[in-house]
Image (cartoon, grey):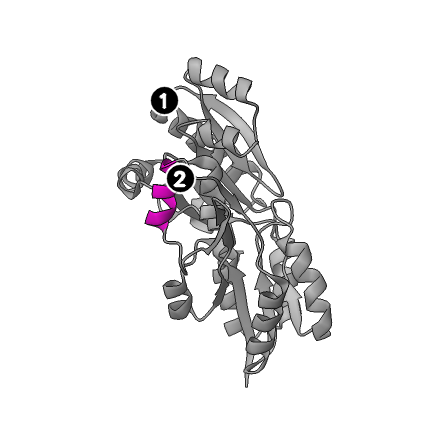
Amino acid sequence: MKKTAVMTDSNSGITQTEAAELGVTVLPMPFLLDGEVYYEDINLTRDDFYRRLEEGMSISTSQPEPETVIETYRKLLEDHEEVVHIPMSSGLSGSCQTAYMLAREFEGRVQVVDNQRISITQRHSVLDALTLAEAGKSALEIRTILEADKFNATIYIYMDTLYYLKKGGRITPAAAALGTILKIKPVLTIQGEKLDSFAKARTLQQGKKLMVTALKKDIDTRLGGIGGTENVRISIAYSESREIALAWQQELASEFPGCEIGIEPLSLSVACHIGPGGLGFACSANLKAM
């Protein structure tokens, strides 16, 4: 019997194909599209999602059914001694609290990690959990390490439009209309539990400059004093256009010398509030370097 299984959800941006390659289990997150339930990366592809988003369909997110979570735990425990479950941040969804309650049934064999991550930084945590599991750490030890590291991550996202924030009820129609008139492009941040406003830009180039400056400051002062770009992982985050992200990757090489800069799509649970024109990047401390 294997020792520790690692599971997460599709908010991490890890596809079912990638999950099979990595050896992790990914719960597909449900979406409601005009009242019908779809599951990310099962019967809802990224292309379908963005097509329906641009067509103006009503899109909302939900949690996995408790029965699905319980069944996944049971199945994994048939072949593993323990399970480490890394859901999205408790500050952004109730799925983490639900997982906590469901895990109690398994008397410590299932450890739920609430390290306040989402999208790319959640993906980083999954990769760290795999490394720690391979090193022989127990599920409880992995949870403890990841939760102690929870503030050593940051995400910045540039938005091309306020339309989707308004549609999701995150801002008022009046604020969205004023922002459109003034050609304001917001830059949002996720640091810890919440998705918050960080700055305002008028162009993509200005937004990118703001995000680079902010991330440099975070690396120097906020990410646990980890000492330079060689001890962090940086990934460009994009909603739909990988081409724009690839172009920006070249620009960032001189800004963060010596740092490998990955490119990953934003999870659909974030993208549904951002829209197809979102671009940003995420950074987390490299546990292996600490």
Q: What's the distance in space between the residues labelled 1 and 2, CA to CA?
A: 23 Å
Q: Is residue 286 visible?
A: no
Q: Give the residue at x 72% y 72%.
A: 105
Name the residue nearer the viewer: 208 or 31.
31
Residue on which the image places disc 2: 53
Against 41, residue 72 (above or below) is below
Q: Is residue 266 visible?
A: yes
Image coordinates of residue 68 in percent, x first then y, are 58, 67
Q: Which residues are magenta?
A: 46-55
Q: Amino acid at mark 1?
A: Thr
Q: In the image, 98: left or right of 121?
A: right
Against 176, residue 252 (above or below) is below
Q: Quadrant of the N terminus?
A: bottom right
Q: In the image, 137: left or right of 33?
A: right
Classify mark 2: residues with Cα within 10 Å, few (<14), some (14-19) or many (20+): some
Task: Determine the main secondary structure of the stretch shown in magenta.
Answer: helix
Q: Residue furthest front?
A: 35
Image coordinates of residue 280 in percent, x first then y, are 41, 37
